[in-house]
Image: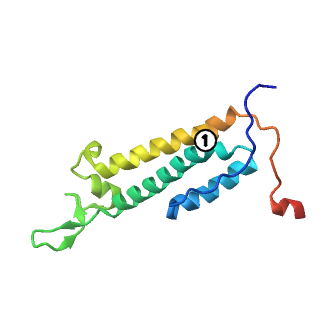
Amino acid sequence: MTDEPKPEVTVPECPRGMSGIAKREWLRITTHLYDLGLVSEIDLMALAVYCDAVQMYVAMRKYIKKQHKYLDANGKETALQQIDGTVLRGEVAYFYGRNAQTQSEYNAMKAAADTILAVSKQFGMTPSSRSRMTIEKPVKARAIDEFL
């Protein structure tokens, strides 16, 4: 047995102002963490950072994916084609002829991904971090388990 602190297992209230994808991720991930006994009130800010990063990542990925519109010499929208006739779309078209490191959307997406992974490791949300954890027992059976 270790002498590590064991705060009460509870789901912190979702921060005000959180919306959309971040709020859905909050509800999804806190449910799983609660079932494993891995969440408490003191985790609020770390979870908020994680959820906001998920929202940023999804938004930037969606933006980059849509950036495949190019205009021809007459100003008409056209697909970007390589010499061999291959049509480039989505992320490939977005990065065509650009240095990915200088694109602000890419940098925002990458920073969000880095944040997601860093926080995920703290909560055992990656395979490698889970392999180093020991959990005594689930906190509470899910409602469906009580009926089986």
> The C terminus appears in which quarter of the rendering?
bottom right
Q: Residue 148: in sight, yes or no? A: no
> The N terminus appears in which quarter of the rendering?
top right
Residue 40, percent from left and from top: 69, 45
Total label count? 1
Residue 86, percent from left and from top: 27, 60
Q: Residue 6: in sight, yes or no? A: yes
Side of 43 where 105 appears, left or right: left
Side of 141 where 128 appears, left or right: left
- What residue is disc 1 on? 126
Q: Amino acid at mark 1?
A: Thr
Q: Nearer the viewer, residue 5 or 66?
A: 5
Residue 14, percent from left and from top: 60, 57
Q: Where on the picture, by quarter, is residue 121?
A: top right
Q: For the residue labelled by badge 1, is the local secondary structure a helix, a strand or a loop?
A: loop
Side of 18 where 105 appears, left or right: left
Q: Nearer the viewer, residue 30 or 110?
A: 30
**Callout 1: 10 Å neighbours few (<14), some, many (20+)?**
some
